Amino acid sequence: MKKVMILAMMMVASATSFAGDSDGLKAILKAKTYDEANQLLKQNLASLADNAEKAKAYNHVLDLVMDKVNKETKIFTENQLSVQMQQADKQKPYDTLGLADAICQSLELASECGKYDQLPNAKGKVAPKFAEKNPIRVWANRFHLVNTGQEEARKHNDANVLKYWGAFIDSRIDPYFAAMDRKSEDAYAGQVALFAGRYAFQAGDMERANRYLDEAMKDPEQKKEALSFKLYALKTTLKTRQDSLNYIDQLKPLLADNPDNEVIVDGLYSMYDGLKMKKEQKELLEGILAKDPNNFVALADMGIMHMGENDAAAAVPFLRKAIGVKDDNVSVLYYLGTCLSVVAQDEKTSAADKKNMYKEAIGVFDKCKAVDPDQMQIKWAYNRYNAYYNYYGPDAAETKAAEADYKH
């Protein structure tokens, strides 16, 4: 009797080990079209026996999508060949958007299949079945997403542009496709990421916008523009003080990675200024100048900070040095000329120093006039006239000419 019981237990164990596909998986595998299979997958995913079944189900839906991809890409390839053979009359229409949609679906399905394929099966073992074939068969078609997205951009179909360019970049940064060769697309991928980030921002999807702009920043040619737009996009979302503090926390690592980026320096300085965080503001500028004494933005902002504290004398050295680094910034020129005049007017300033201060201020304001003759950027004319008045006197020809510029 004991032997019979053991044999029965072995038979049960054997039946369990070699059980067939679950009913849910069988239904999915019987589906002949993508729409049917995808619907069944959504309905039965939670009830599938294990990760291996889920991977198998996703792979079957992927097979059906690839039928569409292969059909349309075959026509596309034949059309290209007919052009090369100068046989334009043999061009065949193909489903451009249908192809792009199918490619998007194939990338998503392959990635999802890979997620379950790399998890332990019912026996607790990791035995991927689709890791070699699936990335390869979906990867090469992605260039169609770039081309179709560009065509949709011309038609102002913004949702489709974001869909196709977003899928292109999402697959590029998906770890599942890490082994795929990206060199052939490096020349244009950064620009696609930048544009995808802009479209995501316009759609109000900041999570995707940040993701795509971060990818664009990996391209040296797109880095500056992508970073500037990222900062702009982030700033537009600020509504509360906590939002502003969170924004500061995002700027700090960006500054650490881009210590010479003037946009970040000025952005962080402005945030501290708006939140009245004077200590942090000063520490920021001092830290930058300790590493780079000739950082134009930090020098200019340090001077402006002292101006805000009504300490023109302390502002002058920083503004002077800033102009020594970059002498065509009309705002900083104006601030320096104004501070020089303020110091010259101080009763504690000696007569000789007053004269020198006004003379220097005149030279700075003359530079303002040369850089911005029509005062389109800043109204420098009155302060320039004031410097001339105090240096030359009210009746001098130079003062009259400066007055004419002011009243013009």
Image (cartoon, rainbow, N blue to C red):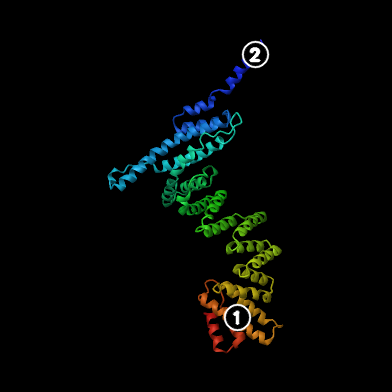
Left of 350 or right of it: where is 54? left
Instruction: Report the number of discs.
Output: 2
Q: Residue 40's x, y, as percent?
A: 51, 30
The answer to which image quadrant residue 388 occupies is bottom right
Kind of residue at disc 2: Met
Under tag 2, what secondary structure? helix
Residue placed at 50% from the left, 32% from the top?
Answer: 39
Q: Which of marks 2 and 1 is nearer the N terminus?
A: 2
Measure the C-alpha gap from mark 2 to mark 1: 106 Å
Which kind of residue does numbered mark 1 sit on? Ala
| Residue sitting at the far top | 1
Question: Vertically, is 287 above or below 44?
Answer: below
Nearest-to-viewer mark from 2 and 1? 2
Using the image as rendered, state which of residue 340 and residue 282 is in the foreground. Answer: 282
The residue carrying mark 2 is 5
The answer to which of 289 and 45 lies nearer the viewer is 289
